Amino acid sequence: MKTKPTLVVIGNGMVGQYFLSQLAESSLKETYQIVTFCEEIRPAYDRVHLSQFFAGKTADDLSLVPEGFFEQNGIRIHLNDKVISVNRANKTVSSEKGITISYDKVVFATGSYAFVPPIIGNNRPSCLVYRTIEDLEQMVAAAKTGKIGTVVGGGLLGLEAAKAVKDLGLETHVVQFAPRLMEMQMDDAGGAMLRHKIENLGIRVHTSKNTREIVAGETCVNKICFVDGEELETDLILFSAGIRPRDELARNSGLAMGARGGIEINNQCKTSDPDIYAIGECALWNGMIYGLVAPGYAMARAVISDLAGEEAHFTGADMSTKLKLMGVDVASIGDAHAKSKGAIVYTYQNGAAEIYKRLVVSSDKKKLLGAVLVGDASGYGTLLQYYLNAIELPENPDSLILPHRSDESVGLGVDALPKSAQICSCFNVTKGDICEAIEAGCKTVDDLKLSTKAATGCGGCGALLKSVLNSELTKQGYEVNTDLCEHFVFTRQELFDLIRVEEIKTFTDLIEKHGKGLGCDVCKPTVGNMLASQWNEFILENAHVGLQDTNDTFLANMQKDGTYSVVPRITGGEINPDMLIALGQVGKKYNLYTKITGGQRVDLFGARVDELPHIWKALIDAGFESGHAYGKSLRTVKSCVGSTWCRFGVDDSVGLAIELENRYKGLRSPHKIKFAVSGCTRECAEAQSKDVGIIATENGWNLYVCGNGGMKPRHGDLFATGLDKETLIKYIDRFLSFYVRTAERLQRTSVWMENMEGGLDYLKSVVIDDKLALCDQLETQMQYVIDTYQCEWKTTIEDESKLKRFRHFINSDQHDENVIFVEERGQIRPANDIERKHFRLTEVA
Amino acid sequence: MNWLNVCSVSDLQNDSGICALVNGEQVAIFYVKNTVYAVSNFDPFGNANVLSRGVVGDLKGQIVVASPLYKQHFNLATGVCLEDENVILPVYASRIENDTVQIGVTL
Ligand code: SRM
Ligand SMILES: Cc1cc2nc3c(=O)[nH]c(=O)nc-3n(C[C@H](O)[C@H](O)[C@H](O)COP(=O)(O)OP(=O)(O)OC[C@H]3O[C@@H](n4cnc5c(N)ncnc54)[C@H](O)[C@@H]3O)c2cc1C
Ligand code: SF4
Ligand code: FES
């Protein structure tokens, strides 16, 4: 019987595993018997995000192998077993543990190792590298006893390692042989700016330093002695001086090698032996070793195609990179060093904001050849498009790196435009069309959108549309008034900035400094809400209580008869029988009308104001907390049952919903916010109709934003796909903070985004690309709110002085005689007018 | 007119309201800029005893309360509704005597 041919993959790292996953999805899975050897003790994990290990990620979190992957796909994996020889004559591979198997095809995916410079003493204690999970474990151990850590190497990886050392709480040094940091990507000025920024973070940078030897230290474990005679005492030493391909095995089996190492491959990723391929960091293509995953993945795909008999090609990969190093945006595209012949260079440097940008342009000024961005990499996406697609540059290429001042772009002089000028190119709307619509009665951008469709496509014309509107209205003698109310001649956003920047903590302070009069039911709740968003003090503090809308003042929703509803939080809609029973008992004891809400929780209606604290005491004792149904704040995070039970679920939607609800509960916002999380694309949680909707996919979480039901339903827009949880939460943090800061009063996220100049794309550029360099602030603010969360009901019932307000009469224990219930379907409801009259008559009689 | 003691000044909340039972009637008492105002607690639009729980402030120079149910504004000194001047709340005389809040009633 002829058995299937055998395919052996040597190395189960990032690229090896990617290769296997692609293989498993192709028909080749049936063609070959697949075997892989993995030298490490665990199968492939995400090396790119290795440093997240320090942020609490476990080896499991970093794993790239779905549970059951090898079994389900019939792949045999030999863990913790290294291949020690490949005998090409016999076509066998043998491993350290003594396994020998015959192969038909071999794929080398052995990766690389961290290069340790041949310095005397480089093997002293606490001299480590940064490549595997075991390396990190050793770092953590070394950091426990040490105070100072030094990274040797100031490239991309070195700086990332420095961040890790800093996070471990050590005084951190970076020693760089080259005269600047990231010498591969940066020019001198960019490197200098980067250095400055990194030093500001408390990391000591030593450039142009040549290490002579490492010896025992006097005050630390080690001492680095430099050629120039200087010395540096340090405990931990981390080498990050580049990578070297792991080609020893291939070399020993006689495959062709590059002069400086690396297994030579052609465009099909074949080595000099047609039955042997090499992919990832061990492979040398056209004299290049690619130290990034994406090119490795491209090689893996090329091998799959070749094995399948399709035309395969790996023809190099782009090495442009953008990353955030310790909060500093850095990006480099193409020929950053302007080595191309005749290249023209433009630079922009802003010392105050610590921004440096450089463009390298072809001699005819038509094509982008390269770019360096430090401090603000928001233009990376656009520039990369210019570079990759050889798009013709605008007439003045430097406009791509010069800052756009908002006053310049808005004050475009719309009056100067002729009536025939096209304002919206998506829907071919001219200035004349807009003026007509305004004459016909349109007074707002929303009106104009409805009647002309302008700005409802890409949204790019939004700003222009607004200027046309304002200018026309002014001409017609209308005042364009965006004041919050008669007490403040500011918009909500302007007031928010004042509160934030001037650290204003009370309404009294704000109105004295920036307003007039006493305030009203518009500005008071709005300011109360902003103060809560920013400072998150207890909303019933004496200084704040008078500001709150009625529902907030009593932490409950007022019903038509003056009674209240009680809505405890039921995160993600998950509730155990005991909690359900407790709810039932409270409902029964206080004779409340109970209903399951549309938000997957239970609402208890008909509570008198004096009953509220008793009801809440009972609920809190049973483990409930406020559901904020009364506040402009996070309501519910709806969930579907997800992968835990549902046969279609691909991820734990309930778990994520609960985590998100707990994270954002209590956050005060311009309007209420609703979330939902679905476990797969069947979308049982209706996530696409929420302000924030999340749907699990095979590749991670998909994030939708700005949907809502209500009066004007709107489906959310797809914002980002395939996110891991950490990135997802980061984006939501930023999104919500930005909404809280910039939306108008009572503006849901949908309307907020639709009115935003630039719309969804702009929102993405702010949240994902950090175009406004605001994300750190936004995240910090959100973290602050999360850290200062309190259950408002718990605080209230624990404070005697606050409870005083929860009575109907200040001078009597009587109840409001106007609150009258009758029975319907076995529960109470407010009596109607006729019933009331009847009730009064019988009472009197 | 008789002045009935209702509560002490410390029972009041600055820029906010409370409700008192005075001679069998529900009176909403507000404390704004060290002055007390008293109007009926009954919201004639919502038909519920809730006005003491509204937000107080000023609009065009008049001190007002906004109904918590449907947000109509009532002038606290005159009881007149700003949205519909045909609707007028009963207004009560009120004052502070020796830290005691008093409502005037005619017997
Ligand atoms: C109880 C509940 C109805 C139910 O029996 O299912 C409900 C009840 C109220 N809704 Fe709602 N909404 C409820 C789910 C919804 C939903 C469905 C959902 O959340 O999945 C929607 C549409 C989805 C959305 O919001 O995008 C919804 C859209 C509204 C709107 C319209 C919002 C809009 O942007 O157009 C209002 C009015 C407003 O907020 O200004 C509103 C306002 C209200 C108020 C607060 C009206 C009021 O001021 O008295 C109701 C008071 C409830 C109370 O006293 O406790 N309710 N409301 C639901 C409570 C969910 C919860 O557990 O918190
Ligand atoms: C801290 C850090 C940050 C990084 N950040 C980025 C980034 O932001 N972006 C980016 O694109 N890239 C980044 N990289 C690089 C990226 O991780 C590598 O490009 C990628 O891991 C290469 O995959 P690989 O499979 O070729 O090698 P590896 O992932 O190293 O896998 C090779 C595997 O083969 C095993 N092996 C070797 N020899 C044998 C043998 N004889 N028998 C059995 N097994 C063997 C090794 O033990 C290893 O497990 C980073 C790397 C590090 C260390
Ligand atoms: S959305 Fe998907 S996972 Fe969730 S319940 Fe529906 S089918 Fe199941
Ligand atoms: S240009 Fe108007 S919407 Fe695209």
Image (tube, coloured by chain):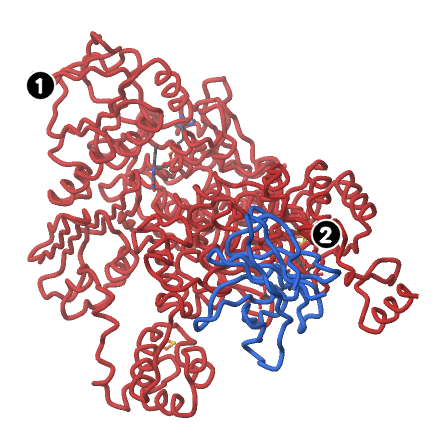
Look at 84% across and 71% down and name the residue there. A837
What chain is tagged by disc 2?
A: A
Residue A460 seen in render:
yes
Name which residue type carries label 1: Val
Give the quadrant of the C terminus of chain A.
Answer: bottom right
Quick one: label 2, few (<14), some, or many (20+) residues within 10 Å?
Answer: many
**Outermost residue to the right:** A845
> Which marked residue is nearer to the observer: mark 1 or mark 2?
2
Q: CA distance from mark 1 to mark 2?
A: 73 Å
Q: Considering only vertical position in the picture, is B81 above or below A307? A: below
Q: Position of residue A704 (x, y in %)?
A: 51, 58
| Front-lying residue, A768 or A584 | A584
What chain is tagged by disc 1?
A: A
Residue A684 seen in render:
no
| Front-lying residue, A505 or A828 | A505
| Front-lying residue, A35 or A22 | A22
Which quadrant of the figure shows ligand 4?
bottom left
Horizontal arrangement in the rendering, residue A597 relative to residue A538 (left or right) = right
Query: Which residue in the protein does label 1 denote?
Result: A227
Name which residue type carries label 2: Val
On whether disc 1 and disc 2 are found on a single subunit, the reply is yes
The kind of secondary structure element at disc 1 is loop
Q: Position of residue B48 (x, y in %)?
A: 71, 66
Look at 63% across and 72% down and name the residue there. B89
Identify the mark at residue A602; answer none if there is no mark. Answer: 2
